C-alpha cells in the first residue's frame, strides 16, 4: 500500500463520520476508534504528521459542515449557554410553593 491510497482511506472515513454527524447519527465507537487507529498508524509509518492530519480533518469538516471544527465548537457552546434553564422557581421551598 502506498501513502496516497492510505491517506485517501482516512479521508473517506472522515467524510463518512462527519456526514453521519451532520445527518444526526452518531458514529459508533468502533468506527471512531478505527479511524483514530488509522490516523495514528499514518503518523507511525511516516505517511503524515499530526499537524497534517489535523489540517486534513478540518478541511473535510469545512467541506461537510461549511465551517471549521473550532467554529462549530464555539457555535455549540453558544447554543448551550443560551438554553440555560431558569431554576429560580425552585428556590422557594416546596411546601411554600404548593400552598401559595
Image (tube, rainbow, N blue to C red):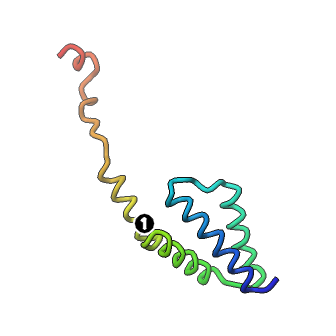
Q: Residue at x 31, y 48 (%)?
A: 83
52 or 6, which is in the foreground? Answer: 6
> What residue is rendered at 53% in x and 59% in y?
21
**Quadrant (top left, top right, bottom left, bottom right) of the N terminus:** bottom right
Quadrant, the C terminus: top left
Residue at the outermost left position = 100
Q: Residue at x 42, y 72 (%)?
A: 67
Question: Which residue corresponds to the image point at 69% horizontal and 80% vertical from the top-left?
Answer: 7
Q: In the orientation shown, which residue stands out farthest toward the top? A: 99
Q: How many marks?
A: 1
Residue 74: percent from the left, percent from the top? 38, 65
Vertical position of residue 5 compared to residue 38: above or below? below
Relative to 42, does residue 72 appear above or below in the rendering? above
The answer to whether 52 appears left or right of 92 in the picture is: right
Image location (x, y in percent) of residue 90: 28, 29
Q: Residues within 10 Å of mark 1 (few under 14, many from 20)?
A: some
Left or right, 14 with respect to 91, comes to right
The local secondary structure at tag 1 comes to: helix
Give the x, y percent position of residue 70.
44, 71
Would you identify the image quadrant in which residue 68 lies? bottom left
Q: Which residue is mark 1?
A: 72
Looking at the picture, how far across and down is residue 37, in whole percent? 73, 68
- With respect to residue 6, does 18 lie above or below? above
Residue situated in front as seen by the camera: 8 or 96:
8
Closer to the camera, 12 or 79? 12
Amino acid at each position: 500500500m502506498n501513502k496516497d491510497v492510505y491517506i485517501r482511506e482516512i479521508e473517506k472515513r472522515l467524510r463518512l463520520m462527519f456526514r453521519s454527524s451532520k445527518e444526526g447519527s452518531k458514529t459508533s465507537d468502533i468506527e471512531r476508534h478505527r479511524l483514530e487507529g488509522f490516523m495514528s498508524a499514518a503518523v507511525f509509518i511516516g505517511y503524515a504528521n499530526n499537524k497534517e492530519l489535523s489540517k486534513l480533518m478540518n478541511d473535510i469538516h469545512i467541506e461537510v459542515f461549511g465551517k471549521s471544527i473550532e467554529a462549530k465548537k464555539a457555535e455549540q457552546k453558544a447554543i448551550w449557554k443560551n438554553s440555560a434553564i431558569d431554576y429560580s422557581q425552585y428556590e422557594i421551598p416546596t411546601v411554600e410553593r404548593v400552598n401559595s
